[in-house]
Image (tube, helix red, strand yellow):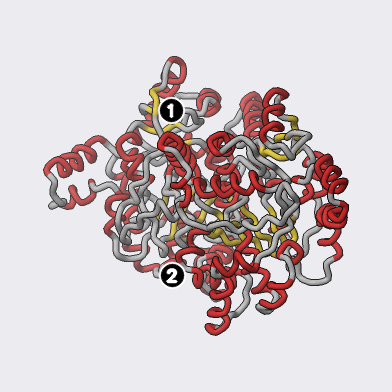
Amino acid sequence: MEIVDIEENLNAQLKKDYEAQKDGFVQVGERKWFYPWRYRKTAEELKNFEVRPDDIWITGFPRSGTTLTEEIVWLLSHDLDFDKARDVELSIRVKFFELDIVINEKVEKETIEQFPEEAANFARRRNILNSLREAKTRRVIKTHLPFELLPDDIFKKGCKVIYVCRYPKDVCVSYYFLQSNNNMMKFRGGFEKYWRYFKDGYCTFGPYFEHVEQGFKLIGSKNFEFVFYEDFKTNIEAYIKKLSELLEITISEEELEKFKEYMDLDNFRKVTKTFMKTDNNEPLTDFVRRGKVDGWRDHFTEQMNKEADAWIQMHTEKIGIKYPQQKKLGKVGEMTDNLKYPFTFEELKGEEKELAEKYLEREILRVSGTRYTAVTPIKKYGAELYNFKPRPDDIWLLGYPRSGTTMMQEIVYLLGTDLDYQKAAANIMDFRFPYLESAMLRLDDWEGIYDRMVKENREPITQEELEAIPPHKRLQKWTEKRFIKSHLNFAFLHPDLLNVGCKVVYIVRNIKDCFLSNYFFPLKNEFEKRKNEHLLEMLRVYKKDLSLWGNYFEGLREAWEKRNNKNMLFLFYEEVIADKKASIKKIAEFLGKELTEDELDKLVDHVSLENFKKNKSVNNDHLVKAGLFVKNENFSFIRKGGSGGWRSKFSKEMNEEFDEWIMKNLKAIPGFEIPQCWKEAMDL
């Protein structure tokens, strides 16, 4: 990852404000992580550090509660040895992984010249990584580095990882006092200037929200826990229990009471020792400060507070995080937390508008500042869909249209209903496993009926009126277990979707077959217009990021980032159809279901292409009879269901253009490696 020096004039000012950082600062990577210059010397060693499977890593932005969490974790993993905890400095028991980068060599030399007895202490601080390598017992490690700068094996090897988060205003105040009073930074710019640096990412380990986002995205991952400092303050018992469960350590009620007494903040402040010193080389006695929630109110001016509120709102909406100070929980079944909708829209212009009208046959909008497009009803329903509240027992199926979602709906529904084939056959898929945002694509007649009921402020009376209620409105009132399908990207769904405990299956299909299947989607009005069109022209529409359903590659990127969440199962369509039995078994395990061999074989046969095409509850033949769909060799709701069908339709020119476009977009997805099944399916 690229490391660059801060711009010369800014660096000069930063060195003036941070007196102890005499060599200035650098920024790292696209997120511009901000560190003292010495990071250049240790970056590679930190990234390549060898982790152990039994390591415990405590992470988080500085002054977020990592110190008290270190103590809790150390005690839990060391048989509650309170005596040793009182006698041995915490920084010796729990190593500060990257401590070396914040110690300026010139300041170190000056300090040792003035206080020779400090030489041994500096040597110990410089030797953190070696001491970790030589450790004979289980290691507890503290770090403020973001995950992308830490060793890649932390999660691969099964380490336990805790991310501690705290409200940014309180973090800023606490960090200001620490960096002003200790001899490793000596900040001299005053609080108002420090606030500006904190907000703009010019304080060590910043930017703050980029740091928090990396932890927040991992919620649900195996061996990982995301905790709020504020929860420690409001319920220390629950906080300790949560950490003990992560570490798989049992603690008795009696031990818990002793623990709570020891971790009481007043007591903890007395017993905690730190290696940090003041300007006069005296021990920093207020390393553990007030620990107050909302203590920022004593330091922020009215104007600073307005700026902070706007800054926090912008980033929390983007990330989807809610601090305990912000949470207002609704009842189960309520529509919303009243989250502010984070998107605005703009009309297409010029060539984009012409292409959309000609080839997509609908008015679509561009989501401002993004690659996303959507049909115009998103202005009416977008905020409602974003605020549609998931429940812990929901099962969701997500994926781009024509990615095998219908087959997957049938599999997931049967697994979720204990293989109730009779119930499945008796109900059309759209009624038992609703398509969440289908109101955005339905006929104007249905919209008119629904709008009339809303205007008259009444419940539906006729069957026609009942069916005109948008699925997301109907689902809100369901009392039974809900099965929900959506083609929306994660960005347009409730931010807590993967945090409340519901199960989410995400399926992705190679873009060539996905594109072809969408092209031959059997809506009758599209068939009449599209049968004489050329695939190459439609490809060039896609290349301009014009689509009815968001954006294929952005959707893949979002899902790929979340693939390790314990509440999500990420599947490649090609792997599913190559071995349906193994895939169904995998899905069953994810949903907590056990199948006998006979049950497994029956389900595999049930979703075979031949049987699936005959299945009246899924094949949408009722829409053919109603005149909405067509059904012929090319146009059919259940088509060929295979892989590589594009080969019979793409010209050489089109395939070459497609390959170039695909590779460019897949390479832009961080950490994504093209699976073998896609290499074979797309001839890559």
- Left or right: 53 with respect to 568? right
Say what amino acid the circle numbered 2 marks. Leu
User: Residue 178: which disc?
Assistant: none
The residue that appears at 64% across and 68% down in the rendered structure is 271
Image height of 682 relative to 182, above or below:
above
Query: Helix, strand, or loop for circle 1?
Result: strand
Image height of 387 relative to 395, above or below:
above
Q: Position of residue 457 (x, y in %)?
A: 13, 46
Q: Dot 2 surroundings within 10 Å: few (below 14), some, or many (20 or more)?
A: some
Q: Nearer the viewer, residue 209 or 632?
A: 209
Query: Helix, strand, or loop for circle 2?
Result: loop
Image height of 11 relative to 233, above or below:
above
Q: CA distance from mark 1 to mark 2?
A: 42 Å
Q: Residue furthest top?
A: 350
The residue that appears at 66% across and 34% down in the rendered structure is 17
Tell me the quadrant of the picture where the C terminus can be found.
top right
The residue that appears at 59% across and 59% down in the rendered structure is 221
| Residue 660 shows in this picture | yes
Quadrant assignment, res 651: top right
Q: Position of residue 219 (x, y in %)?
A: 55, 56
- Left or right: 479 with respect to 128? left
Q: Earlier in the sequence, mark 1 or mark 2?
A: 1
From the image, tell me which residue sits under label 2: 419
Quadrant assignment, res 355: top left
Q: Position of residue 4 (x, y in %)?
A: 74, 31
Say what amino acid the circle numbered 1 marks. Arg
From the image, tell me which residue sits under label 1: 366
